[in-house]
Amino acid sequence: MAKEDARIPAEIGCLDTDNLRVTLISTVGAHCDVWQTAGYHFEREKNRAFDMVIKRHTLSCNSLDVKIYRRDYGMLKKQLHDIIPEAIFVRTRIDGEENMLVLAQAFTPWFNLANPAIAEDAIPLMAKLHKARLQLGLFIQTAKEIRTNQQKVIDLYGLDNLVLDRNKEVRYLDSFEVFFHEDLLYMIDDPCEDLREKIDVSVKRLAYLEFLLASANELAATLS
């Protein structure tokens, strides 16, 4: 549940956290805490206000880590367009240590698309949403191609990673480690069971999304 805070409880080099009012959104993501702020003004754009999500990396993160995170996110953005929010990856100091911050375009999750437990609700809903079905089809196709060509599995393990927003458009809201590297399961002698579980869940949820889209398209055809 969101919780109102006076400010982010950390010293962040690129933000005036003392005067930034935020709402705590999540502390259960992969190595990050997430806040949202409304009406933030950047120094050079004082006439524009931004609804923004702030994601603070909670583990140490060096320049190479930042480069990889930015590269993977940028690849998804290039292929999935507006499904992926605009985001800035910033190398900065957090509580005196070199780390990373993500400042992302804010979207409010409205419906969790990757949850098989609510298929009975998802199928008739998606049958009515032509644009969302096209977006979901692009997401599925892209995720399958990346897995086949690069042995990377898009992260569907995270809570509310793939959602409909309040405008009933598909959004992918993860920023850190958007891929799991499937080839690591075969390259090392004792792969982490946590990694195996995350990959298995993500693959199963992608298969469910294919089922959801096919079912929604079939229902939409009967309604037209």
Image: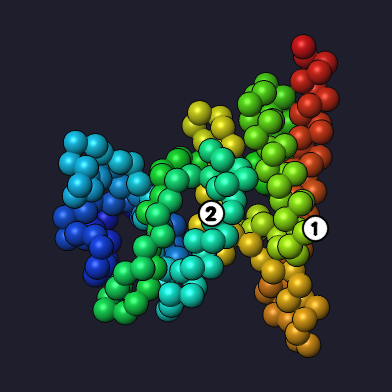
Q: Amino acid at mark 2?
A: Gly
Q: Quadrant of residue 147?
A: bottom right
Q: Between 157 and 174, which is closer to the camera in this rendering?
A: 174
Q: Residues within 10 Å of mark 1 (few under 14, many from 20)?
A: few
The span from disc 2 to disc 1 (Cα, nearest Å) is: 19 Å
SS at mark 2 in the image: helix
Q: Quadrant of residue 127?
A: top right
**In the rendered image, which quarter contains the C terminus?**
top right
With 154 as the anchor, is 23 left or right in this view? left
Q: Residue at x 25, y 63 (%)?
A: 14
**Would residue 116 be seen by someone viewing this image from the given angle?**
no
Above or below — where is 67 with respect to 131?
Answer: below
Q: Amino acid at mark 1?
A: Thr
Residue for badge 1: 148
Q: What residue is shown with label 2?
A: 74
Identify whether 109 is placed above or below 98. Answer: above
The residue positioned 62% from the left and 45% from the top of the image is 79
Looking at the picture, how far across and down is residue 57, in whole percent? 42, 68
From where the camera sits, is residue 129 visible? Answer: yes
